[in-house]
Structures are given as C-alpha cells and as structure tokens.
Amino acid sequence: MIIPTGRKLLAFIHVLTCVSIGSWQVSAEIFETSTSVDDCDEVFDFVVVGSGPGGGVVASRLARAGFDTLVLDAGPDYGSQPEEFDVRAPVLWPATTQNPFLEWAFRVQNTDDEEQQDVLYPRSSNVGGCAMHNAMQAVYPFQETFTNLAELTGDNEFAEDKMRQRFIEIEKNEYLPESQDESTGHGTAGFTSTSFGDQRIVDGDVQFARTFGALGSLYPYDGPFGVNIGQEGFPLIINPDINGVIGNTVNFADYEGIHFCPVSISPSKGYIRSGVYGLLKETEGQFSDTLTIKPNSFVTKVLFKTNGRSPPKAYAVKVQEGTSLYGVSTGPQSLGNEKLYCASKEVVVSGGAFNTPQILKLSGIGPKDELEEHGIDVVADLPGVGKNLRDKLEVTVNFDMAAIWKIFEPIAQGQCTLDPVTDPTAFFTSACWLDYLSGNPSIFSSSAVFYSILKKSDTSLPRPDIYIQVTPSRFERYKDGWVQESTTVPNSLSLNLATETTNTEGEITLKSDNPFQEPTIDFKGYSSEDLTRVAQLVSEFSAVISSLPDVLNQVRPEDTVDLDDEQAVKEWVKKNGWGHHACCTAKIGSSGDPDAVLDGQFKVRGVKNLRVVDASSFPYQPGFFPTIPIMMLAEKAADDIIAEYANV
C-alpha cells in the first residue's frame, strides 16, 4: 500500500553552481534563497501544470494512488458552469474555439508566404485542456509510435502490447458488442467513451447515402471483415474499426478505404463529449483528500534548488491567479493573488506543445544563448527545448452540393439555430435542442464527422499515410470568421486531407521574459515532398468528387488553379496548408541526442524532480489525431511515477 507523505514542511536553501551532466550544462551563477513553510502557500506531493489529456490523466492517477496532488490550469473550470452546454453538445465544438472564456487565439507562421505569416491557431485554456474544444476524433496512434519509443529509450514499457493495454484501460467502447471488445483490443470500463456519433441523423438522406456510397465504391475498404452499412440501393462497405486489432494478425488501420470515424462522444450519457474532464471531476469527487484542482492559476515559472553537488531540483511553481491573463486570451481579464505552490516530490509540466517549452525556458531550461538574450538565469542548457516543432500538413477541398443536407434542413428552414448568443431564447426552445436533451436524433448529437478515408500516397507503404475527413459541412481552415462560415453553407461537402510532415525545423522561441506574452511560433514551411504528396491527392479528389451526380461545383481550389499543373497545385497547397496538431517541442530521446529534452521516464535532463507529459514529449507525430496517444502516454508516465515512489 502506498503511504503518501502529505503536505510536509519544506525548508530549502538555493545555491546554483556549475554541474555538468552529459551534454547538458547547469548554470555557474550562484545565488541563495531560503524557503520555509511560510513561503509556500500550500505544499503537495506533486504539482501538475496543465489539466489536459496529459496533465489531467497524470494528476488523476497520482491522486487515486494516494499522493497529495495539485493540478493547475490557467483557465476556468468551465465544465462546471451553467453555460457549459457548448463544451458538451458535440456539434457546438466550433463555437467553443471562439468562446472568450476558453479561447487562446494563437497566431503562427506556417510558411514564408505572405498569406501564411499570421495564421489563427486556436487553443483552449480551461480545466480539461484542448480536449474540451476539439472535434473529438478518437483515433488510435500509429502502430509504430510506441514501438519506436521502446527502441529509442530501451524502455520495454513502451512496447506496443503494453501500450495497447493502457488504451484498453482508458477506453469505454460504445460501438462494439461487449463480447468483441477484449478480443479486438478495446476496453469497456475506461473514462473516455468512443463511438461513431449519432448515425440516426443522416438516415433517410438520399444525397448523403448516394454521395458516401459513391465514395465507398471509389475508395473501398481493402481489408478483412468489411461491413455493409449503406442505405437501400446505395451499398457502402467500410472498415468496421480502425482502432481495432485481432491478435497479431490484423491491424485494421493498416488498410486503405472508407471507415467510420471514432469520436469521444458518449451515447450512453446522451451524446455528450467524453474525456479527461470527466475523469478529473470524478477523481475530485471520490478522492477529494488527495486531488486539488485550482483553475484560473497561471504558472509563470518553475523554481529550483541545489545543494551545490547535485543537479538543480524542482521544488515549486510560481502562480499568478486571474482570468484571461495570457496575451492570446480574448476574454475579460481580472488579476488575483500571486501564489507559491511547493512539491515535496516532483513538478510535472503538461502545458502542451506551445506552452511547455515557454514555461521551461522562463524557468531557465533551454538553449543557453536564447535564455541569456532575455536575461534569464540558465539552470540547464538544453538546446532542444522549443525545437523539433512539428505538425501535419492539412488542406481542405470544398464543393457545393445540389441540395441541403438533411441535418441542416431545420436550420435552413428557421426551426433551429446553432447560435446561442444572438437569441438564447430561440436556441434553448428550438426543436433541435429539445430533441437533443430528450435523446432523440438531433444535429447537436454529432460532431458532423461520420466517415473518413485512409489512403496511401505510395502503394509500397506499410500503412496509409493520408487521412481524409469527409464532412457534410463547410470548413476551409482555421481562419478569422471560420465558425460563422461553418454554419451558413448547409449544402457544402468538405474533404480535409492530412498527412504527417517530414519537416523538423519548426521552433518555439521567446519574445521576452514576460510569461504573459505568447512566444513566436514558426513551423518553417513544408518540404517539397510533403507538398507533392498532398497536391497529387488534391487533384485526384477534385476530379473524383466533381464527377459525383449531386455535386454542383467545386469551390476550393478555385477555378483559377490549373488542377492538371502539379506545380500550380503545390503552390496552392503551400499558401492554403494548415495544421492543428502541434507536437514534439520537448522530445523524448536517447542520452546521445543533444536535442533530447526528456528520457524514457519523461524526466527533464539536467535537473531533478521535473517531468514533462504532453504532446511536446513525442519525438515525432504519434498519429493522425493526438488526444488518444497523449492519454496513453500519460498512463505510462503515471505508471513510471507511481512505481518510483511506491516505497518512498
């Protein structure tokens, strides 16, 4: 049985001196500070910075294991507020990205093109993290993701069979018969539901059946156990389960073709968003003596101590309380108190691909030259912090259909609205909303993603490298005004093509030592190889979709783009490419990699008692969608931490 140490008296003497650890250097500057229990506002075993799919899972697991755990988030506990309906009802996910109480509206540079210099990149600041505003895709990581990490670190806990078991533990599968779950690599008792959304709302839509039936015939599923889910007269053979496996012989994600898109929506709870927020609140309710959640708590810095002989040791975080304090916040700002929260065991940073490297650098961990440029005392010279910024290359092709999709008919006819702000009374009394609350088919019970396509850009590849989401809605990319556009074109068909990029030169750099000023985020473009792969598919899908009987015309690429000219299409992709799955800016790596920030147990190199667990921890893109891979990673991190402190 684990016996936690509780909130112990801490008395620390800080003396930073030069300590060499492999290729990482600790600062030679010496200073002294004493910290007593009176200086710490509160003391915990663990302090976790960030409550998303990484930090939220780690904090919950530690609290359930008996450790006194604090989890901090810069945003509110929005899910507990009366107005939280927009983070629950799946179709309202676009609105959550512009909810001023949650929104962090980053601007990034994608390429050197003028159109790509100041691109909207929405993030979410609230308890539950970006899992409270995303489109809820719940897709298993690439088969090689954790196998490669096992080889890279020599840690067999990353082995695919062990990571699959962690997936089973977090999943509550709601689309397979229970008798099939364990045999196909699924779980039934986890905290995150997976389903195919509400398929009832497209029943009887002839245009939908004809369009997706045609796509199924053009891009048929080429693996075993295909399922015919087409409507009468429109057969549609699909991949039944891209998250599933059958022993060591069948991995359904290895096959091309059309498939159901699994989403983290819980039909059993009324088609609501499911994930880490629910886990946190359940843990808080059942383990209130060991889990403390503090929203509106912006972490400005991690503090370190040293005895002059060993590496600097993380012992506390500085916090500024308040709302909408960050430079990319869009909500009403308020300023609270400064706090110092101390950790008797460890600090875990889970701020995400943008904010984790910023926090580390502001705390003195990062490239020495950059830190000194901003007057930051160097605690550990880690040149890899903020480097290796990666994302997918995504581009969207759009078409106008002959008729309005059935799911949008009530809106087009003025019977329903997706806008709760302009006329709240009309919204909450509409038939669509009341149907949703009653469990009847409604546009609100779906994220508007039903089927997707897996495709190989080269037939010799071992698995598909292109993911194509096909949605009966208008979406071009994240840009100013995109939310309004998505609800005003009820006859649009959008195909979003996504692939992991080969570019590893992206970087997060500080603008200043001000923790409330967002960093510079530069993805530094796309390789010619990436642009060619995507451009070829843009031309292919443009020709294929335009030929379908219900398609009126193609909207994007515009008719000024010669789709037979590969170079012209590559230029269009370069100017219109985007992404929203940033990762890899504090990567796990081998001891011989000078840019490695973490070891296989997520420990930050060059210091002690500090770990990073989030999207930044991956050395490469972990999958087509990051949420499930991050939660699996967090389960492994929690296992590592609990094992280390089990007898301490």
Image (cartoon, helix red, strand yellow):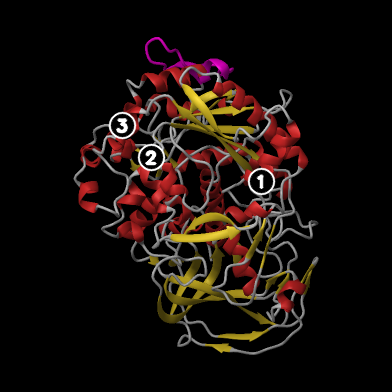
> Is-magenta flag for residue 594?
no
Residue drawn at 55 percent across, 42 percent down: 625
Q: Amino acid at mark 3?
A: Glu
The relative height of residue 380 versus residue 232 in the rendered view (above or below) is below
Which of marks 3 and 1 precedes in the sequence?
Answer: 3
Mark 3, residue position: 409
Look at the image and give the residue range highlighted in magenta. Answer: 215-238
Residue 575 numbered mark, or none:
1
- First along the sequence among labels 2 and 3: 2
Residue count near mark 1 (Cα–Cα under 10 Å), binned few <14, some 14–19, many ≥20: some
> Residue 430 location in percent, x, y?
21, 42
Q: Is residue 393 above or below residue 257?
A: below
Q: Amino acid at mark 1?
A: Lys
Judge left or right: residue 406 versus residue 634. left
Residue at the (64%, 31%) spot, across then down:
538
How many numbered discs?
3
Could you tell me how far apart the alpha carbons at marks 1 and 2 are, in whole angstroms?
34 Å
